[in-house]
Image (cartoon, rainbow, N blue to C red):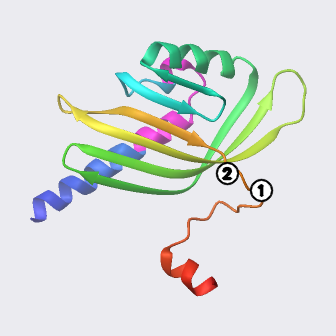
Amino acid sequence: MEAKSASTEQDKRVLFSIVEEMSKSMTGVQSTKHWANDALWFDVAPFASKGVEPARTQFDTEFGKLSSFVVEILESETSIHCDMGIVCSVQRWNIVPKDGTAPSHLLVRQTDCFERREGQWKIIHEHSSVPMIPGWDGKIETREQVSRAS
């Protein structure tokens, strides 16, 4: 049991390091480096794609409009079950457009779903969303916290 736990913890570190690496990306190739060829992507903008190539093109288009894109990972939780892994994170996107418009900051919920394929962790689904109700502080509350507040 001890070896399995150590292996699971190592896998969690690997998955989180992939998410961190992607958060520093400014190109389609960098952003999809760890994606499976058949990955499904739901982005914040009204965009969804199946497969790596449409996502790479969309990343390059969007990053091409920016002079800076800095991601801060505020909170994260990583789960592993056999050959499946999920990293859920709250991220602050700090965006500076090239066109001189004001910088913007978004709180984003990010879910990266991984599958171990041929010994490598690959993203099979990625989903980004922006909360619909303004004022969310980016904190993830537990059921107990919500019950106490009610």
Q: CA distance from mark 1 to mark 2?
A: 7 Å
Residue of label 1: 134
The residue lying at 50 percent from left, 73 percent from top is 142
Residue 116 lies, in percent from the top left, at 23, 36
Where residue 9 is drawn, which disc sits there?
none
Disc 1 is placed on an element classified as loop
Mark 2 crowd level (few <14, some 14–19, many ≥20, 10 Å Cα): few
With 134 as the anchor, is 78 left or right in this view?
left
Residue toward you, 46 or 79: 46
Residue 131's mark? 2
Residue 6 located left or right of residue 108? left
In the image, 68 versus 106, the foreground residue is 106
> Of all residues shown, which one is farthest toward the bottom?
148
* Residue 121 falls left or right of residue 47: left
Camera-side residue: 11 or 83?
A: 83
Vertical relation: 106 (above or below) 46: below
- Region in magenta: 17-30
Is the residue 36 above or below the residue 146 in the image?
A: above
Q: Residues within 10 Å of mark 1 (few under 14, many from 20)?
A: few
Magenta highlight on residue 47: no
Asked where in the image residue 52 lies, by quadrant, the reply is top left
Position of residue 135 measured from the top left corner of the image (x, y, whole percent): 77, 61
Secondary element under disc 2, as helix, strand or loop, is: loop
Look at the numbered discs 1 and 2 and tell me whether their residues touch, using CB distance below 8 Å.
yes
Mark 1 belongs to which amino acid?
A: Pro
Left or right of 37: which side holds 73? Answer: right
- In reply to whether residue 22 is colored magenta, the answer given is yes
